[in-house]
Amino acid sequence: MEYPVRVTDYTTQRGHAATVSAISTLTAASTPTSTAAVEATSGLNAPAGITDEVTPSTVSGSRPEEKDETARRATDISRRIWPVHSTLEAAAESELVSVVGDKAVRSDISLRVLQQLYLPDQDKSYRTINHENNTLSFPLAPSFPAVKALPSHERKRILVTGGAGFVGSHLVDRLMLMGHEVIVLDNFFTGSKRNVQHWMGHPHFELIRHDVVDPFMIEVDQIYHLACPASPPHYQYNPIKTVKTSVMGTINMLGLAKRTKARFLLTSTSEVYGDPEEHPQKETYWGHVNPIGPRACYDEGKRVAETLTYSYMHQDEVDVRVARIFNTFGPRMNENDGRVVSNFIMQALRGDELTIYGDGQQTRSFQYIHDLVDGLILLMNKNYKEPVNLGNPEEYTIREFAEIIRGEINSDVEIMSLPPTEDDPQRRRPDITRAQRHLGWAPKFSVHQGIRETVQYFKNNKREELDSITS
Ligand SMILES: NC(=O)c1ccc[n+]([C@@H]2O[C@H](COP(=O)([O-])OP(=O)(O)OC[C@H]3O[C@@H](n4cnc5c(N)ncnc54)[C@H](O)[C@@H]3O)[C@@H](O)[C@H]2O)c1
């Protein structure tokens, strides 16, 4: 059995040589060195012993000595899957991605600057103060983060629908730091003002409470259309509303793009491929979706949103882009949204069992948020109109992923299998050839670096709750 270990570092093409040289030094023994080899994502043979499966019966309800052994193996697996990025202590700073974005579209920026927005020093954070007399204070930020000074003819007015959500808020951070004017349109169904509060009052920033199901008029140059609940519990909460958001919301935003001649980008999803019969999934694959299943409101909603987008392009010459996003994770994910990464992290932090639906052999690929934002900005600013997959092609079974999170956070927690969910896709992995060829894009972050930041975010933001559980 082979475990995928990403040895590619596409940052070479973008001039971040420090990261590349560090990774190549550390992986020198097994990493291909020619340019061609470096451009391919390799599957390396796992070291002996890594193929040991941890079955539900050996994990749940095991005796203490078995549990210790299982915990040791979990940590071991985590370390072997990432021989380079094994632990925070072992990982030298130079191994990690330290610059995100792309010089080609002037989105490059130090990761440290972005981190200050979602992992701020505690004394500079916007944490709500809970007073003893049952009142709350919301102290203002000491100052806004510095943004690039763009000449007015280069500064764009950019609308981000769903900009208060997980992906949207990171996109907003980047567009603001790039020096643009950003208008966020959000009904706060799953998003939160807290995700963008560090920009409130900034002269380049506006936040508008609005439901995209209703028409909206504003003069803008670009529209990133993200508004739509993305996690199964949220989009299944009111399936009719989800379809309306996808269909009517997209019609309204495409109508706005048509009237203002703005470029329009739709955030579609890998769910348009359904439970795929083709693997990995290329953009040319038409998908395998159950039109009346519990996921249909989202999957079919996005498929119609894509149809609308290309209909406006052909019929009304709207300048469009379509990103098909695969599983993405990172800080500001909603911890209750039922997605696998936030579920596992919160369960491990609370010391609860990690819950797997089905046998855990279904696969997913996990992309870190900054890689996605890089891809979205590149897609918007390059001249390519066909749908583009944005995802990390490293593929893990859900069980492997649970082991990894357990190894990272809390080796004592157990893994429990629950009955499978209906229409759960069995395999997911993007073919990113198109993104590489037309955008010069490929993910840079290891899952490990992403998980580490995400865990830190959840710890910071759930500190009181976690303290009360663990004390
Ligand atoms: N995160 C992922 O892994 C992923 C994967 C594939 C596609 N996507 C797509 O990316 C986009 C953002 O996803 P996310 O993970 O940030 O989800 P999210 O739920 O965190 O963000 C969605 C945002 O849209 C807002 N919204 C929902 N319905 C709205 C409406 N009718 N009017 C106005 N605002 C509305 C929400 O309040 C929220 O702020 C979605 O379109 C989603 O389909 C995300």
Image (cartoon, helix red, strand yellow):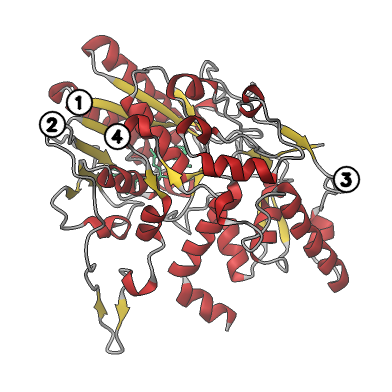
Q: Which mark is residue 48?
A: 3
Label located before the other in sequence (1 or 3): 3
359 to 8, vertically: above or below: below
Q: Amino acid at mark 3?
A: Ala
The residue pinned by badge 1 equals 262
Pointer 1 residue Cβ closer than 8 Å to ligand 1: no
The residue pinned by badge 2 equals 153
Pointer 4 residue Cβ closer than 8 Å to ligand 1: no
Q: Quadrant of residue 321?
A: top left
Q: Which mark is residue 224?
A: 4
Q: Quadrant of residue 471?
A: bottom right
Label located before the other in sequence (1 or 4): 4
Which mark is nearer the camera, 2 or 1?
2
Q: Residue furthest bottom?
A: 132
Residue drawn where x is 67% and y is 67% of the image: 410
Label located before the other in sequence (3 or 2): 3
Q: Which mark is residue 239?
A: none
- On the rendered structure, is 74 left or right of 265? right
Q: CA distance from mark 2 to mark 1?
A: 15 Å
Residue drawn where x is 82% and y is 69% of the image: 68
How dense is the environment of label 1, judged by Cα within 10 Å: few (below 14), some, or many (20 and up)?
many
Query: Contact (CB < 8 A) between labels 1 and 4?
Result: no
How dense is the environment of label 2, judged by Cα within 10 Å: few (below 14), some, or many (20 and up)?
few
88 to 8, vertically: above or below: below
Identify the secondary structure beneath mark 1. loop
